[in-house]
Image (cartoon, rainbow, N blue to C red):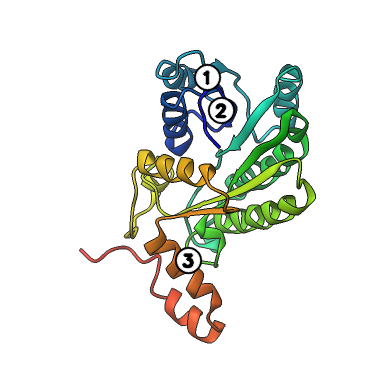
Amino acid sequence: MTFAGKRIWIIGASAGIGAALARALAAEGARLILSARDGAALEVVAAHCPGAEILPLDLGRRDTLAAAVDRLRQHNLDAVISTAALYHPGRVSDLDPRQTEDIVRVNLLGALAVAQLTPPLIRDGGQLVLFGSVAGYFGLPRGQAYSATKAAVNNLAETLRIELAPRVDVRLVCPGFVRTRLTDKNDFAMPALLSPEEAAAEVLRGLSGRQFEIHFPKRFTLAVKALRALPYALSLRLTRRLGQPPAE
């Protein structure tokens, strides 16, 4: 897929990878619709994306997504890219129930709503791009609700790849650690940490190709994939060392 002149809706465009993707796609000549909860932050991003349309919504509220879809009924989109997510690290025993509900509502139920409501807007052969995570490959310490929801999104994308084919080209993006306001909450070492701009470049490279899953950086994601393939007796022993605060 080339991006010049393409009409692309990014949900979660106000910060992090979503904002970096918006800037990168605008530089390629894409025509953008930018959505997120924070309208003021979207204005800042749109200032670097000539001609971008701003359409605020809260992915944790299905009705706001449905209203946005209704507004776009006359559009024939080349791609819908959903990057929006919430994250709060911690042990299961320490999780705040309300925060956990918000994570499930945005990360999982929001992804399901995107999967149900947006495909009619996508032209034949267009792309639906869901952001899972390498955190969804295996139950790593302190990821908890986030990791569980991302495992579900990974699974959802696999299902949609079959259900929506051949009309819609479903893609799954599984980043490793990317420097954003979400990962700024971590107090442990994050291997192979990328900038949002590096992550956006990886996503665009992947969307230009044919692979279903776009995962990066490979030096990290392949290691976690290998961990998933090991017997639990070994993989759980290895992950016991993860998620610990770095030594001072």
Which quadrant of the figure has residue 168? top right
Q: Which residue does the image show at 44% across and 44% down from the upper left?
A: 182
Q: Which residue is mark 1?
A: 39
Q: CA distance from mark 1 to mark 3?
A: 34 Å
Q: Residue furthest left?
A: 248
Please name the residue shown 62% across and 33% down the image.
Answer: 79
Q: Secondary structure at mark 2?
A: loop
Where's the C terminus, which quadrant? bottom left
For residue 119, side relative to residue 151 (left or right): right
Q: Are marks 1 and 2 in contact (CB under 8 Å)?
A: yes
Secondary structure of residue under mark 1 = helix
Q: Quadrant of the N terminus?
A: top right
Q: Is 96 on the left-hand or right-hand side of 224?
A: right
Residue at point 73% right, 38% down? 113
Task: Depth check: give the residue in front, 124 or 14.
Answer: 124
- Distance of mark 3 from mark 2, alpha carbons? 29 Å
Residue tagged 3: 141
In the image, taking residue 230 as reference, residue 191 lies left or right, namely left
Q: Earlier in the sequence, mark 3 or mark 2?
A: 2
Please, what is the three-letter code of the amino acid marked with disc 3?
Pro
